Amino acid sequence: MKKLIQYIAPAFAFTLLVSCGGSEEVTPLPEMEVGHVIKGNVQGAEGLEAKLVVFEGGVNTPIDSSLIVNGAFELSTRTKELRQYLLYVENELVLLFLDPTSQDVALTGSMPGLGRNYEVTGSGFSESVQEYMLFILNDYDKEVALINEVNACNPDDKKQVEYLMARLDSIFVVQRAYAVENIMKDTTSPVSWLMLNELFPVNGMAGFDSSDIKYFHMVSNGMRSKYPDSEYPQYIDDQIAGINAQYQSLSANTDAGGKAPEINLNDTNGKALPLSSLKGKVVLIDFWASWCMPCRQENPNVVRMYDKYKDKGFTVYSVSLDESKDAWLKAIKDDNLSWPNHVSDLKGWQSSAAALYSVTSIPATFLLDREGNIIAKNLRGPELEQKLQQVLD
């Protein structure tokens, strides 16, 4: 399942006005803007907590919570301007879009499985999101199973890999058609922005249809006309720039003997960690993910190589194709990946680094010499150890 785009909301600011004159009267602070009210009734959730989160400043920002009593809860937003909200009950998620045309929201559903078993009124966008989510969830389990099969395949069994990828592509074709049809119905809708994700093939940018970039421009222009004060259109423009850069980079030389293209993603603390900062060391670029069983099975060997050769100038630059930061961090801890160089943009198969290196299956590795040149690719187990012996011993 493609990662949902995360939206950012502007912060509020209040100004204290002091009058000039003998009395020095202070004008009272204006009241905070009244937002939307979300009233819910969820069966099977007695005593659980409903939490409301908004994307602001690029991070998840909790803004309200309510204990569910007799199935009922009530939450409030802080503005009526366009925002994306995530409503959580335990690990169940309901996605909402609210804007000035929305009314107070009524949500009903049941646990477990609230994310698939709910009804919402008062917000046309939220109803559209529900329809979209239910559509893609129909194929979600099937997609995950096929991706796991691809990752578990012997890379030399090209016929089986091609068969599985063809089945994934057939799902993608249906999802893409659904997205294009609905985007064309309303290019001003923020739900159309979510649907742009369905234009990214499951095998990454290598299969991206460059003509689809027109839909990104259409949604950006449409939303800019409807929400002229919103920052959302700029985010779409940033997506367009990123797509163009990734698409052009597919021709980058990642064969042995070529210079390794720069990667500059954030580490586990959210700080940029460029690959070039490791120049002077022999570096193994390791593309992996917490959900990739072959990757996890290979991790003990990589740990052993790191422990054996780190004092001789060897290190690992791990690029995760995770979408969940929690799952990524847990896997690092559980597998004892003790080197400090862990990066990810948490975009899964839409990772800019994966596109840059034309990575369409994982684990995938690139071994660099001390000058940053690629000297070997896709080494595992004994092959990796043998190469490191040649380079470092």
Image (cartoon, helix red, strand yellow):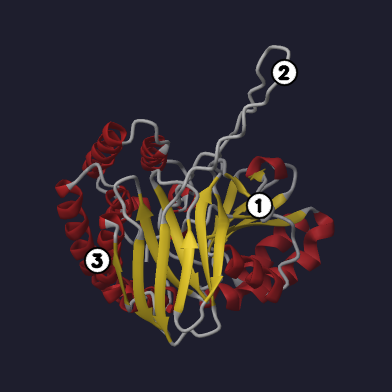
The answer, for residue 156, to whether it is visible in the render is: no
Question: Residue 267: which disc?
Answer: 1
**Percent x, y of residue 158:** 33, 71
Q: Is residue 272 left or right of residue 349?
A: right
Which of 115 and 29 lies nearest the eye of the viewer?
A: 29
- Residue 43 against residue 203 in the figure, above or below: below
Q: Which mark is residue 35?
A: none
Q: Residue furthest bottom?
A: 44
Q: Amino acid at mark 1?
A: Asp
Q: Is residue 391 visible?
A: yes
Disc 2 or 1, which lies upstream in sequence?
A: 2
- Whichever of labels 3 and 1 marks the residue nearer the N terminus, that label is 3
Q: Secondary structure at mark 3?
A: helix
Q: Position of residue 43 (x, y in %)?
A: 40, 85
Residue at x-position 46% and y-position 46% = 79
* Residue designated by label 3: 131
**Numbered tag placed on residue 23 in the rendering:** 2
Relative placement, left or right, of 172 versus 279 is left
Q: Quadrant of the C terminus?
A: bottom right
Dot 2 or dot 3, earlier in sequence: 2
Rendered image quadrant of residue 204: bottom left
Instruction: Label 1, secondary structure: give it.
Output: loop
